[in-house]
Amino acid sequence: MPTLSSANVHLNTLKTFRQTVYESGFSKTRDALFELSDAVLLTPCAHSFAEFSLQPSFRRGWPMLYETLQDGVIDRDSLLDLYLAQIPRTQRPLLAGDHTAWSRLHARTLRERTVEHQPNAIPNAKPITVGQGYSTIVWLPDTPGSWALPCLHERIAPIESPIGKVVTQLRAVCQRLRQRPLALFDAEYGCAPFVNQSADIPCDKIVRLRPNLCLRGAPPA
């Protein structure tokens, strides 16, 4: 059980983190953006965007939700630097990349919907859905558990590919790390395009290969 002094240290760290996000991560309409961020974190399951305005942390009317995202400015590079600063420098960073589908079957007016891979439990049904795909790079702590620190979580545009997107994200993260990380990827990235595009990134990679994959010749070290 943590002591009172250790709890104060964690609380002060959290306060410093939030203050830095407020000052360097948000510029225009930072007050509304900060309150909206808290509202998103405090809402376990939102059934509509306007529902975030019901959180006590968002002290504005629901129309301000749309104005906040329309007028607000978020400094992604500053936030990424802040996230990576939370990684202890005494250990080698362990990263993981993944591609996740957000199913939006009935959102007919949502722009740039694409066909995404999604497992389907119905026999003989194609494992696909219609919605948007997201690419994520996270840092995995050494402590056992399900918690991870998202470094980059971005939507994959129709003109982009999941492999190209995660390579761009991995490059941005590794350029900011002082230690050479180890990155883990599932079988979607066990292919030549990913290996070739990420070959010059200062990172060691462990990639799962599909059981039906054919390797031509012995791979080098």
Image: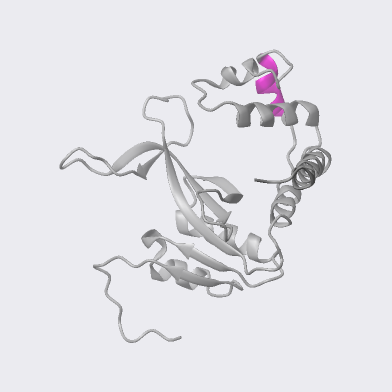
Residue found 63% across the figure and 15% down from its top: 54
Residue 50 sits above or below residue 167 on the image: above
Q: Nearer the viewer, residue 100 or 115?
A: 100
User: Where is residue 151 drawn, in percent x and y?
Assistant: 62, 52
Residue 96 visible? The answer is yes
User: Where is residue 104 drawn, in percent x and y?
Assistant: 41, 31
Residue found 51% across the figure and 59% down from its top: 96
User: Where is residue 145 drawn, in percent x and y?
Assistant: 51, 51
Residue found 43% across the figure and 36% down from its top: 113
- In the rendered image, the residue lying farthest to the top is 61
Residue 68 in magenta stretch: yes
Q: Nearer the viewer, residue 107 or 151?
A: 151
Give the side of residue 24 with respect to residue 63, left or right. Answer: right
Q: Nearer the viewer, residue 124 or 20?
A: 20
Residue 151 sits above or below residue 68 on the image: below
User: Where is residue 221 drawn, in percent x and y?
Assistant: 46, 86
Quadrant including the N terminus: top right
Residue 164 in magenta stretch: no
What is the span of residues highlighted in magenta in the rendered image? 63-71
Main secondary structure found in the magenta portion: helix
Residue 198 sits above or below residue 111 on the image: below
